[in-house]
Amino acid sequence: MSRDAEIDAMRRAIDLARPGVGRTGDNPSVGCVILGPSGIVGEGATAEGGRPHAEELALAAAGAAARGATALVTLEPCARRSSPGIACTDRLIAAGVRRVVIACTDASVFAAGEGTARLRAAGIDVRTCLLEAEARTLYSGYRPAAEK
C-alpha cells in the first residue's frame, strides 16, 4: 500500500467525519475508510446520536474484504464502550485487518492508548498521527470522557 493511497484514504475519512461534528451526542464524529489492494472497500462515519461507530459501519460495508486490509481512522478506536456493544478495537481485530492508521489519539477513558495497545498486541501494525493537524480540527469541541 502506498503512502499516497493512505493519505488519500485518510483525507476521505476526514471528509466523512466532518458533516457529523456536533451531531453525534457525547461521542466525537469519526471517519473510517477500509483500504484494500485495489482501493476503498468500505467506509463509514459515526452516526447521528453517536451510534453506530464509524469502524462498525466501515467494516460492515467491507465485509470479507476487510481481511488483510488497512483501516484508516480519524480518531483512535475505542477499547471499551460506554454502552453495551463490541468495542471498535475488537471489531477491527475480528475482521482481520492487517494495519490501522490513526490520525489523532483519543484521551477518552474508552481509548487513551488502550485501543492502539490492544491492536498491537493482536499483531496489527498501528501507525499514528497521519494528517493529525487536519483531523484535529474535527475535535476542537470534543471533551473526552473521564472516569466517573
Image: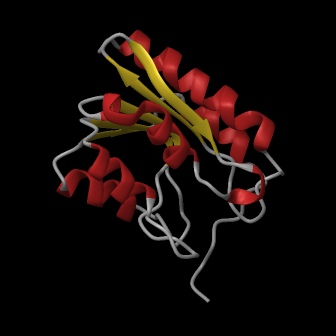
Q: How many marks can you see?
A: 0
- When the figure is inspected, residue 8 is found, relative to residue 59, above or below; the finding is above
Instruction: Locate residue 124: give its quadrant.
Output: top left
Q: Nearer the viewer, residue 81 or 134?
A: 81
**Residue at (53, 57) in percent of width and height:** 106
**Residue at (59, 36) in percent of width and height:** 44
- The colour scheme applied to this rendered structure is secondary structure
- When the figure is inspected, residue 46 is found, relative to residue 1, above or below; the finding is below
**Residue at (53, 75) in percent of width and height:** 84
**In what quadrant of the picture does the C terminus appear?**
bottom right
Q: How far across and how far down the image is residue 18, in percent?
A: 74, 35
Q: How far across and how far down the image is residue 132, in percent?
A: 55, 35
Q: How far across and how far down the image is residue 51, in percent?
A: 66, 58
Residue sitting at the far right: 22
Q: How far across and how far down the image is residue 90, in percent?
A: 34, 59
55 left or right of 118? right
**Residue at (45, 70) in percent of width and height:** 80
**In what quadrant of the picture does the N terminus appear?**
top left
Q: Nearer the viewer, residue 123 or 141?
A: 123
75 left or right of 136? left
- When the figure is inspected, residue 148 is found, relative to residue 44, above or below; the finding is below
